[in-house]
Image (spheres, rainbow, N blue to C red):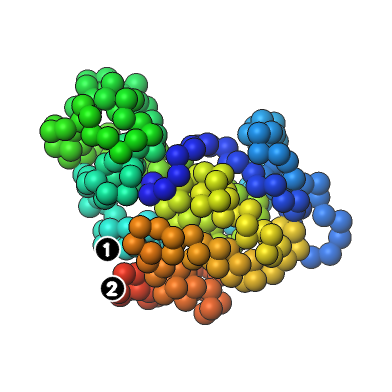
Amino acid sequence: MRRGVLLFAAVPVVATAAVYFLAPSDSGGDSPAPTASTAQVAPEEAKDRAERERERDDEVIADLPAGLASKGKKELAQQLVASADNSTLDWRSLYGSIEDLDDGQGYTAGVAGFCTGTHDLLTLVERYTEDHPDNGLARYLPALRKVDGTDSHEGLDPGFADAWRAEAEVPAFRAAQEEERDRVYFDPAVRLAKLDGLTTLGQFVYYDAIIFHGPDTEADGFYGLRARAMEEAETPAAGGDEKTYLAAFLDVRRAALAETRDGDTSRVDTAQRRFLDAGNLELRTPLEWETYGDTYQVP
């Protein structure tokens, strides 16, 4: 995770905007009552409400196409993210990656950019250690808890980076990284996108935003960006046009990216916006895009 520190892993925090669920293929008739993820609700009440109404939301989602959650599209999503974050399509080469990007988040590591300063790396190691108590990272848990929320390496240097790389050779840790990526980022993003009435491209737009900005309710966190976009355009679930809403979301996201450390907005300008302008709402391949000046293709 590149930004944001508030993690609400399995249950998204809901922005305070009133919308009602309507699948993109629906038209006419009375709209159902709002779902947990789309109803107007104060942020502090959102988690409890989502838990209460999760079963109802599951029923809504079960009737929708797999979208980004299908095997091929999920693979494509990881390639797209890796091209922007790590200049590669080979996202599986990133299990052992670890470096301090000088962005105030401490070490950034693994397939989802887990950070020592933003709680998600700590949670990953804690959950992994529950199942594998003798792993090579367990001895760093006291230090990880101490530096959580800071950019400090206290208690981590000089051995933590090497220990991470070594543990990344263990299949169980690779699986744990993917599971935590899905639990914290992929599944909540795709779930909320579907409840907002978005198809495959929109689901990826949400996923890329949450993994970069973090599941944070602040203005530059994912849920903050979504709230601002909903002030500019209605979601398809509220009866709005999908392309119009996604254009508004990308406008808001681009402004947030411009304020980041390197200010690069190419993952929006020459990737996601390009797909949207082409009307490729299903993320059909072949795809070609650019990030940081490099061109990528998926046949």
Q: Nearer the viewer, residue 243 or 101?
A: 101
Q: Nearer the viewer, residue 247 or 145?
A: 145
Q: Which residue is mark 1?
A: 87
162 is higher (above) or lower (below) than 241: above
Q: Which residue is mark 2?
A: 294
Left or right side of 12 for 73: left
Identify the residue at image location x=66%, y=34%. 44
Q: Are marks 2 and 1 in contact (CB under 8 Å)?
A: yes
Helix, strand or loop for disc 2: strand
Identify the residue at image location x=49%, y=38%. 6
Q: Horizontal and vertical percent for residue 63?
A: 66, 51
Residue 193 visible to the viewer: no
Residue 90 visible to the viewer: yes
* Crowd rating for badge 1 (residues with CA inside 10 Å; few <14, some 14–19, many 20+): some
Q: Horizontal and vertical percent for residue 263?
A: 38, 64
Q: Horizontal and vertical percent for residue 31?
A: 82, 54
Distance between mark 2 and mark 1 Cα atoms: 8 Å
Q: Horizontal and vertical percent for residue 131?
A: 33, 23
